[in-house]
Amino acid sequence: MNSKKIQNEFVKGLISENPVLGLMLGLCSVLAVSTEVKNAAGMGFAMTFVLVFSNILVSLLRNTIPPKVRLPVFIVVIATFTTIVDLLMNAYVPEIHKNLGIFIPLIVVNCIIIARAEAFAVKNTVFMSVIDALGMGLGYTIVLMIIASLREITGNGTFWGIKLFGDFSPILIMMLPPGAFITIGLLMGIMRRVKK
Amino acid sequence: MKEILLILLGTIFVNNFVFARFLGTCPYIGVSKKTSDSLSMGIAVLFVLILASVTSWYIHYFLLVPLKIEYLQTIVFILVIASLVQLVEMFLLKTSPGLYNALGIYLPLITTNCIILAVAILNIRQEHNIIITLIFTLGAGLGFTLALVLMSAIRERLELSDIPESLKSEPIAFLTAGLIAIAFLGFSGIN
Amino acid sequence: MKDIAKLGMYLLIVCSVSGISLAVTNHFTAPRIASEMERRKNEAMSDVLPAASKFVKSKTHEKVFEGFNYAGARVGYVFETLASGYSSDIEILFAIDNEYIVTGVKVLSQSETPGLGSKVSGDEFLKQFKGKSREKIMLKKAGGDIDAVTSATISSKAVTEAVRSRIYEFQKDTK
C-alpha cells in the first residue's frame, strides 16, 4: 500500500471533494448547529464517529451484502451507530447533547454517511474505508467549525463561550438563520474560486 | 379552530422548516431549479410526511413505549420511512406511471430528506396528540413546498442574469435563501 | 421465492445484531442518563428554592413541587410554567415561599431573539423577581416593580405575566 495513495484518499475529503462545500451533502446539520463553536465540535465528532464505524462495518460486510437490500442494510448499520452515539453523548456530555438536540438522531439521514457507504465503503478495504471516513469527517468538521467561528465571533462576540471583545455590538443576523445561509453561500463561492 | 390556524401559521411561516429550522435543505438545493419540479417534490414530500408521521406516532405510543424500547426510535422511524417511500414508489408505478416518471429520481431521495425524520421525531418530543400531529405535519409540508417553490421561482430568473462564475448555481441559491430567511424573520412577531 | 427468503434472512440477521447491540448500549447508559436528569432537575429546583433540600411532587396540583428542609418542614413551592414569548415558548422554573413571596426564577429554555429577548434568561432580569410578592410582579410600565429588558418588552412581559398568573392561580386555589 503506497502512502501517497493513502494521503490522497484522506486529503480529498478536505478540499477537492469536501462533502459540504463541494459535494453539497450534510447541509441541514451544518446550518443548524453552527451557532456555537463548542456545539459544532460536538457535532463534528458525533458525525465522524458514525461515519467511521459505518464505513468499517459496511466494508467488512461488503462481500456478503445482497445488492438488492444494500440500502436497507446501510440504513440499519448507520442508524445503529447513530443511536449508540446518541446514548453515549446523552450519558457523558449531556450539555452538548442537549444543545445539538434533534440533530443527533438526524445524523442517520446525513447524506454524507450514506453516500460514502454506497460510493466507497462497499467497494473498498476496511483500512481505506477508515481513511476515507476520517478525511470526509474532518472535512465536514472543519467547514462546520469555520462557519461556527464566523457566526459566533461576529454574532455573539465569543469563541467557545469565552468573551473576546470588551464592548462589542454583535451582528445579530449572523446568529439567526439568514446568517447561516449567507455564510455558507459565500464559503461555497470562495471554495469554487480556490479550486480553479 | 383558532389553535389549528395558529399551528399552521407557525409551521408554514414563523418557524418555516427550511428558512428557520434548516430541515429539508439538501434536496432543496438540488431540486429547486425549476418551479414545476419543486411543486412535484413538495407534494410528494407532503404526502410521505403525513403517512410517515402518523405511522411513526402510532408505533411510538403503541409499540416502543409499552415495550420500553424508546431508544430504538431512530432506527425504527427511519426504517418505517424507507419502507413507506418504497411502498409509495411501487404504488405510483402501478397506478400513475406518468406521475412516477415526473418525480423520477426524487422519490428515493425523500428517504434521506431530514425533514421527514425530523417531523416524526418532533411530534413525539413536543408531545402532540394525533390531531395536532396531523396539523403540525401538514404545516411542515406546506411550508417546505412554499420554500421550494419560492426558491425555484427566483432561481429561474437568476439563470438569466449576470452572476460571477464562482457564485453560479449553488452559492447564489444559498445567498438567496438567506435573503428569503431574513424576510421570514419578519413573521416571528406573530403570536 | 428462495431469493426473497435469503434477502429476508440477511436483513433479519443484520437487524437482530443491531437490536442486540443497541439494547446492550442502552442497558449501560440508561442509569447514567436517568440520574443525570434527576440531578439537573434537583439542582435547578435548589437554585430557585435554596432553603429546601428535598423536593416532592405535589399530589394536589399539577406541575408543582413542594420543597422541604432538613427538618421535614415545608419551606415553599416550585412551579414549572410555560410562557408564550416573542418567538418561542419560554420554559420557566420558579419558587415561592410559604407566604407566596418569590424566592427565585430560572429560565430553562427559550428561543427568543438572541441578544435581546434572550436576555430574559439572564441574572440581571431574573434577580428582580426575588423577594417580591405577586402584586409587585408586573412591568414598571404597568405599575409594577419589574424593569423590562431593553428593547425586549414582549419577552419580558411574557415571563412576568407567566409567573404572576401562576402565583395568582395557586393562591386562589390554596387560600
Image (tube, rainbow, N blue to C red):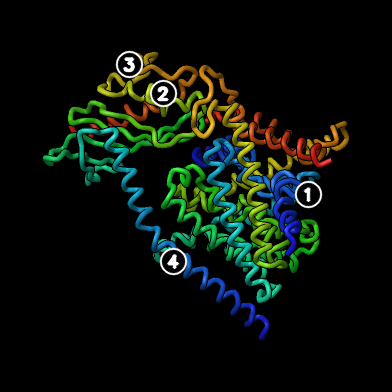
Location of mark 2 (residue): C157
Query: Of helix, strand and loop, which one carries label 3?
Result: loop
- Indicate which disc residue B60 carries: none
Identify which residue is drawn at 23% across, 43% down.
Answer: C55
> Are callouts 3 and 4 both on one chain?
yes
> Are callouts 1 and 2 both on one chain?
no
Residue placed most toward the observer, B10 or B86: B86
Q: CA distance from mark 2 to mark 4?
A: 46 Å
Identify which residue is drawn at 66% across, 58% down.
Answer: A131
Q: CA distance from mark 3 to mark 4?
A: 53 Å
Is residue B134 in view from this perspective?
Answer: no
Residue type, label 3: Asp
User: Could you tell me which chain the residue with mark 3 belongs to?
Assistant: C
Residue type, label 2: Lys
Q: Residues within 10 Å of mark 2 (few under 14, many from 20)?
A: many
**Nearest-to-viewer mark from 3 and 1:** 3
Q: Residues within 10 Å of mark 3 (few under 14, many from 20)?
A: some
Q: CA distance from mark 1 to mark 4?
A: 42 Å
Query: Of helix, strand and loop, which one carries label 2?
Result: helix
Q: CA distance from mark 1 to mark 2?
A: 45 Å
Location of mark 1 (residue): B37
Q: Position of residue C141 (x, y in %)?
A: 39, 13
Looking at the image, which residue sits at the far bottom?
Answer: C2
Location of mark 3 (residue): C145
Going from N to C along the chain, the mark reached first, 3 or 2, is: 3
Tell me the quarter of the picture where residue C173 sits. Answer: top left
**Nearest-to-viewer mark from 3 and 4:** 4
Identify which residue is drawn at 58% across, 35% down.
Answer: B14
User: Could you tell me which chain the residue with mark 2 belongs to?
Assistant: C
Tell me the quarter of the picture where residue C54 sits. Answer: top left
